[in-house]
Image (cartoon, grey):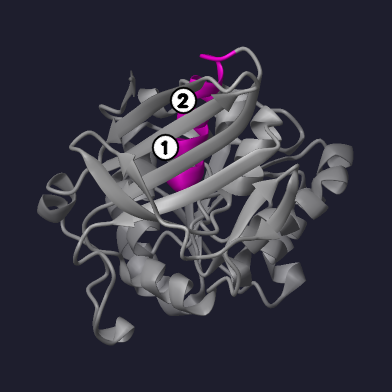
Amino acid sequence: MNTLMIYGAAGYTGGMAAEHAASAGLNLVLAGREKDRATLEAMARSLGAGIRLFSLDDADAVATGLDGISVLLNAAGPFANTAEPLISAAIRAGVHYLDFSAELDTYREALALDARARAAGVMLLPGSGGSVAMLGSLAGHAVTRVRDARKISIAMHVAGAMSRGSATSASRNIVPETLHLADGELVTRSPQEVRDFDFGSGPRSSFPVTLPDLVTIHHATGIPDIETFVHVSAGAFPTGEVRQMPAGPSLKEREASRYHAAVEVTDADGTVVRSRLDTVNGYTFTAMAAVEAARRVLAGEVRPGFQTPAGLFGSGFAETIADTRIIDL
């Protein structure tokens, strides 16, 4: 039977993903470091899953840990520390790789390994949840509304509190430059170029940010000019010591904080079309989307090399998750 491994299942989003995977009836192995043994053992008993413990510092241990695994979902951030060793090991082991990183450099690493993955018949699907799955679907949908799309301006509305893991990753992986895609190349732009997007309740001031979607949307659509923005609701960014934060927002907090996104696509003739996305909280979406992606890959929806969720599964992928909706304006 095909087997899914979730590495980092002891974490906040990884734990939610493990619960969804078990509910979906997937053959599941929970994995992580020795320090997480007690947590993983308790989860494994509760979910009827297997367990494996190995550090990413030992390539032989990682290879042994991946023995018999069909699909690996990396849920262990910061992904700057975990993506490359797990991707490299997955390619050697013939295991398809997924994650939900929000860190641009890990996508560059995955792209650099594209040829090796293709040669090994292995698929690399970073961004199987989070903004890459959301915004990729929204952009892919909107692009079909024009004849010759030349530019995409896309923004996410982040609501609710961050998890401790997300805050840790953000603090360690601050991109020193604000980037956008111009003529197919990543170039700097002023972080002061703030603009409004309407996420469904009127214009909201949004600031330019460097998101991995600059790479993934370009890869899926070929559009040469892409810019990414974020509007953050009050209270989303932590103000105290990260180590003192709770693991993540409660179910009640997530249910009260839906995510939204908005996109503008400009055609070669200057026509602009707009669409927006309404979905569940980002953490809920990510856990569900990553497991749905893994389920599809286990079922044979595979294309070797670097892929994106919208490119692989189609721009309707996000709308298969919970009650996500895309609305044309």
Main secondary structure along the magenta-highlighted residues? helix
Q: Are marks 2 and 1 in contact (CB under 8 Å)?
A: yes
The residue singled out by tag 1 in the image is 289
Q: Is residue 22 left or right of residue 245?
A: right
Q: Earlier in the sequence, mark 2 or mark 1?
A: 1
Q: In the picture, residue 233 is in which quadrant?
A: bottom left
Amino acid type at circle 1 is Ala
The image shows residue 287 at horizontal and vertical percentages of: 37, 45
Residue at the disc numbered 2: 317
Which label sits in the foreground, 2 or 1? 2
Q: Locate residue 57, reporting x and y percent.
A: 68, 77
Residue 139 is covered by the magenta coloring: yes
Q: Is residue 71 above or below residue 64?
A: above
Q: Who is closer to the viewer here, 264 or 292?
A: 264
Residue, x 45% and y 78% (percent of image)? Answer: 171
Counting other residues with Cα less than 10 Å from the Cα at mark 1, is it few (<14), some (14-19), or many (20 or more)?
many
Segment colored magenta: 129-146
Q: CA distance from mark 2 to mark 1?
A: 9 Å
- Give the amino acid type for the residue marked by disc 2 in the picture: Phe
Q: Who's the residue at 25% across and 64% down the image?
A: 236
Residue 257 drawn at (x, y percent): 18, 49
Q: Is residue 27 magenta?
A: no
Secondary structure of the residue carrying numbered label 1: helix
| Image location (x, y in percent) of residue 190 | 55, 64
